[in-house]
Amino acid sequence: MEQWIQLFIDGTTIGGVYAVIALGYTMVYGVLRMINFAHGELFMMGAFAGFYTLDAYQQHSGLNDSLPVFTIASAIVAGMITAVVLAVVMERIAYRPLRHAPRLAPLISAIGVSIFLRNVMLRVTNAEAQVYPRVFPRGAIEWGDVSVSYIRIFLLVLSVFFLVLLWLFIERTKMGMSIRAVAEDRDTAALMGVNVDRTIVMTFVVGAALAGAAGAVYGMFVTTATAGMGFIPGIKAFTAAVLGGIGSVPGAMAGGYFLGITESLSTKFIGAQYKDVVAFVLLVLVLIFRPWGIFGKREDKRA
Amino acid sequence: MMQRFEATRALTRALDNANARARAAFDAIPLIRWILPLALGVVGALSPQWFDTRPTYALMVLITYLLLRTSTNVFGLAVLAAMLVYLPMEMDRFERGILFDIALYTMLGIGLNIVVGYAGLLDLGYVAFFASGAYIFALVVAPEAGGGWDIGASFWLMIPAAMALAAALGVALGLPVLRLRGDYLAIVTLGFGEIIRLMLNNRDDITNGPRGVYLIPKAHFFDKELTGPYELYFLVLAGVFIAAFAAERIRDSRVGRAWEAIREDEDAASAMGVNTTFYKLLAFAIGAAIGGGGGVIYAAKQTAIFPRDFDLDVSINVLALVIIGGMGNVRGVVLGAMLLIGLPEVLRDFSIEFAFIDLANIGADYRLVIFGAALVAIMVLRPEGLLPSRRRAAEFEQAEMLESELAT
Amino acid sequence: MTAERAYLELAEVVSGYGQIMAIKGVSLRVERGEIVALIGSNGAGKSTTLRTISGLLRPRSGEIWFEGRRIDRAPPHEIVARGVSHAPEGRAIFARMTVMDNLRLGAYRRSGAEVERDIEHVLTLFPRLRERGRQDGGTLSGGEQQMLAIARALMARPRILLLDEPSMGLAPVLVETIFRTVLEINREGTTILLVEQNAAIALQVAHRGYILESGAIALEASAAELRESDAVRRTYLGID
Ligand SMILES: Nc1ncnc2c1ncn2[C@@H]1O[C@H](COP(=O)(O)OP(=O)(O)OP(=O)(O)O)[C@@H](O)[C@H]1O
Ligand SMILES: [Mg+2]
């Protein structure tokens, strides 16, 4: 039993990260019907922004608090801001001019952005992993055989916090309503007076903010930042978005946790080296048999 | 009444046939048309005794591009044969490597273009077929000491065998995804590609895992040992020609028209009686076979292959070169491969040294940065690709005009 | 400017899709407070005219004036902000949003307590919608969706309302209800440009009408005159 609880908690921790990143994929797909291949790189840039912030603190004053709350918060905010700025720029330069181009053009453009960002960071870091300063106290909460480190608890709580925040934004704010409207029918949304261009930018901004925050926190969790770190979480988050039915916000959240837990279980029962295989097999199976997602309702047969 | 109907039909058919034959004759010309400029471009770029600096390559690509668009040079074939044979003799090992890669990726591009450009099936997992070709070959011919199975079949036998197996894999992967369209198909195929790579890595009881397969024996052409990129370059060149020729012929056949119908509107095609299942699988199979053939040659050249050689980047590169070149035609693929595969390598030697500015390593250090930015720039400036097939260009113009009317 | 502009005026507007010119030089005028009917057979270009006015299509040439200002280069959301509200053909309800959210979207450019009061108001116009408030738009019946589309367009407090075939696919009783409401809305001060297949009923409620044929205005007259005209009777009213 305790073993199960442990696996479940480990799975939800990483699943929360997937869920937060997945929202960006799903929201952009919702409004543009486009897979933003560079989304994983926003996550990566967030991790670097977080790293440089913490590093600057360490150089200046050292990090001798037992739990430097303000420092951690500013690293996360730095991650969010960096990702948001990049997202706005990439939307303007690489995606908006292609809004009416053949379908594959924005895909390739996004791949270009992804290659660009990854290699900029490879140069900047000289292809070396940057090691995060330790900001979280070691140690864990123990409960029988179940042990949950403090950073995991932080990750768990924070992901839930962001998910709730996003849900409120989408469901309860005017901007959120316009995002939903544009996702459903761009022309009719415009007839309601929604500024479609601005709404699309806003969608990128929100998705990027979440990815940037996730990057910074994930960096603290794995204690490194590398130029290539966006790839795997990016694809996993993407898988999560698909599991939940791409375009669906609650679906992306559920998909993230589901994938996290599945991975955690498969690490235990199939073997750690198969956890990525399991994720991809899941992706393929869902798309073949339930293209509207595990949790989604069958809304149309456009698959 | 009935008779008149029959007569009209017969006439239409006759006209169709004549038309098709005329088209086939005309379309043979592009084969010649791109050959000379390609040769020129490659010569210019890669012959150190003619040009000192690699940036000339960029210029050459530009010239090639202009020639590809307009020229219909009949001397092409002869000049080409001479050029393509002479060229690598003048090259050092590094340059031959680039030339080999360009040719190899051209071959892969031709294969993927059948799937994406002709049949309109977006495939992000093309590496699966490349990998399977390479691994089937390597495992069969490599000794146990190199992680192989030590069966020891001949290289020449393995090429068709690996192509057939890759085609079978194409059908096997294609079958479950027949219903899927667009982005969903792209994602599933991406998933397949990654699964294959991860399995190559994990099932080390079969594939020797991350240690790869090595000690792949040299192939022989009669008594001559095919040692490196130089000899194998000719092989891949032959592959390019065969694939290009086959691709253009198939495109202009009944099969090609069925693909076109499926690409334009699958439901309408199937309503008109096109067996969409069969033709989609056929596209997957032919594309996969070409990819598999490329894999065999690649493995033969490398003499050691590893799962990490077959990651998503390969699929992305091949797709990108097809799209950048301009989907749906072989000339586009050639240009795409020159740009996408050649340029990053050539950029290595690019440097800026001017007065107090010293960016001696800008090319080597930033080539992939530049590459990423270039992908974006090309797509934004020419979203239909640099050399779209004429038909595609017309379609695109139509769509663009339509869209420009829409203010949102 | 010396030229007297009508409240809404289209001058030689050419518009369409790609190479297809769906309207080829349409000129029409709508005065403040009027109900003007735009009648024509399938494919005549009626919807295209409305889509061009509301900014979804950009005219190839010609001018569109509303309240003395040119609007033919403005994006749709700005045109909405100036008081033009368009209930498009085929309803275009947001199927995954509740009826209430659909109505709130209609009032997207406005905010505050007013909006809630207006919701109250449109719900008295269409009491059926009140019972369906929490339901998703997609679960409404065709007639209810049509009501919702009109109600939603009203939520913008338009000064001019562009209605595209409000009677399409509705039972005769419902058609009557809808048109009674249209008259009521007009009496409250909203100018209306009404596109209809059902010429009989359109010419009953309208003050004036235009006949659109293959993308050009063929005839303009008062509704009464149009009802009496032989050509209109034959072609659009189905009476010999
Ligand atoms: N999206 C489009 N793309 C291309 N052509 C279109 C498009 N929409 C309409 N058309 C064409 O423009 C012409 C006018 O269409 P429009 O929708 O304005 O007709 P309408 O008068 O509203 O007809 P109906 O009474 O059937 O609604 C038609 O010939 C139609 O085929
Ligand atoms: Mg219409």
Image (cartoon, rainbow, N blue to C red):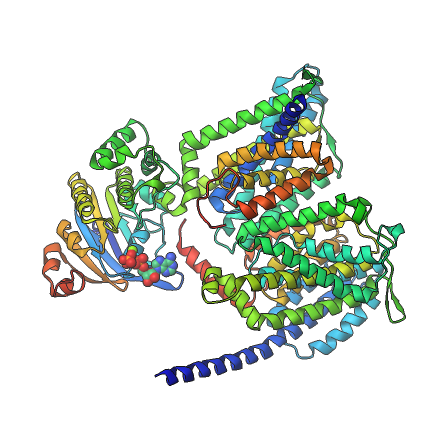
Residue B79 quadrant:
bottom right
Quarter, ligand 2: bottom left
Counting from the top left corner in percent of width and height, residue C14 is at 32, 60
Of A189 and C16, nearer the camera is A189
Q: How many marks?
A: 0
Counting from the top left corner in percent of width and height, residue B91 is at 83, 64
On the question of residue B40 being in view, the answer is no
Of B141 and B371, nearer the camera is B141
* Residue for point 69% across, 72% down: B36
On the question of residue C127 being in view, the answer is yes
Residue B82 quadrant:
bottom right
Counting from the top left corner in percent of width and height, residue C47 is at 29, 55
Vertical relation: A151 (above or below) A300: above
Counting from the top left corner in percent of width and height, residue B290 is at 69, 63
Which residue is most to the front?
A1
Q: Where does the C terminus of chain C fall, quadrant-wise?
A: bottom left
